[in-house]
Every structure is written in C-alpha cells, then in structure tokens.
Amino acid sequence: MEQEIQFLFDKMCDPQEGEAYVYADKLGKIATEEVKDRLIQLVNGDDWEIAYLACRALSKTPYNEEALDAIFESIFDRKNRNQQGAFVQILEEFDLSQRFVDIFRVYLFGNFKASTLAKDYLDQLEFDITPRTIRKAEKHWNHYLHNPEDEGSLQIKKSEVEPMLVELKELFL
C-alpha cells in the first residue's frame, strides 16, 4: 500500500503528467491520516499547481475542516496572490457552511477573481450564522473600511456588504 501511495504522489507531482488530477483523485479516495498530512504539506508548499492538485485530493477526503484550514491559509498567503482564484475555485468541492467569515474575508481582501468567486459563494450558499459570526465579519469589514485597496471598489463593496450585515443581524432580533 505504501508503494502505491508513493506512486500516486509521484504521478500527481510530476510536471510532465498530463492527467495528474486523476492521481490526485485516487489519493483523495485513499484518505488515510498519513495521506491527508502529506497533502496538507503540499497545499502549503511553494508549487501552486501541486498545491491545487492537493486541494482537489483533499476535497475527496472526510477531512473537510483540516483541509479548509490549510486552503484558506494558502489563499491568504501573499505568495499565492496571483493564484488566489484557483484556490477559491476549488472551495466549491467542500462544505463551506461553517466558513462564512473566511469567505467574507476573501471577498473583501482577495484579488478580482477570488473576490468575485467569494461573492458568488456568499450569495448562493447556506451558512451557519451565529451572533459571533456576525461580530467577526463586522471586525473584518471595519478593517477593510480603514484599509481599502482602492476607492472604486470601496463604494461597490459598501453597497453590498452593509445591507448583508443588516440582514444577518435581523436574524437574531
């Protein structure tokens, strides 16, 4: 079994392999603790294409929360700024119901593609919202208001976020 796992990792990480995603999917189906740990190491590695494949493999495992922790860490890592969109796109393979604040942060601080995808998730997915979730989102919103990336997007985001936060608060009145 160890030999098979190593073979799958080698094929998935081979830049010449045209169907690396097939090997990623096979690794995800094995889903041992060891495989999960190795995949998470790759998510946090320096090669974003291998990290993306590792994310894909993790989406096939039962380790949703641990995988999402690693993926969000990669999304917010400055070295991945140009690839954020790819990492945010793979999130559609995961259960994001507990990750409203993380998706909200991507919407506020992500590059154009990442922010657009995050907005789609915010609009379309069902999240488990608590008063604490709203407070955390407001904290990130206040940070964004005082540190906008550009004034043009500030007005757009303001017109979308402020009604969203009001609507969320109304859930608990």
Image (cartoon, helix red, strand yellow):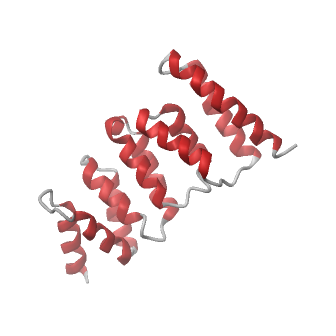
Q: Is residue 158 left or right of residue 119?
A: right
* Residue 17 figure quarter: bottom left
Farthest residue toward the left? 16
> In x, y percent, where is residue 88?
43, 47
Residue 172 to residue 31: above or below: above
> In x, y percent, where is residue 42?
30, 56
* Residue 41 figure quarter: bottom left
Which residue is located at x 51 percent, y 17 percent? Answer: 152
Residue 145 to residue 4: above or below: above
> In x, y percent, where is residue 120?
54, 45
Q: Is residue 7 left or right of residue 114?
A: left
Q: Between residue 109 and residue 41, name the one nearer to us.
A: 109
Which residue is located at x 43 percent, y 70 percent? Answer: 61
Q: How many marks?
A: 0
Image quarter of the C terminus: top right
Q: Between residue 130 and residue 151, name the one nearer to us.
A: 151
Farthest residue toward the top? 151
Which residue is located at x 38 percent, y 41 percent? Answer: 84
Which residue is located at x 60 percent, y 43 percent? Answer: 101
Q: Between residue 9 and residue 82, name the one nearer to us.
A: 82
Residue 29 to residue 116: above or below: below
Q: Is residue 85 left or right of residue 147?
A: left
Farthest residue toward the right? 173
Residue 125 to residue 82: above or below: below
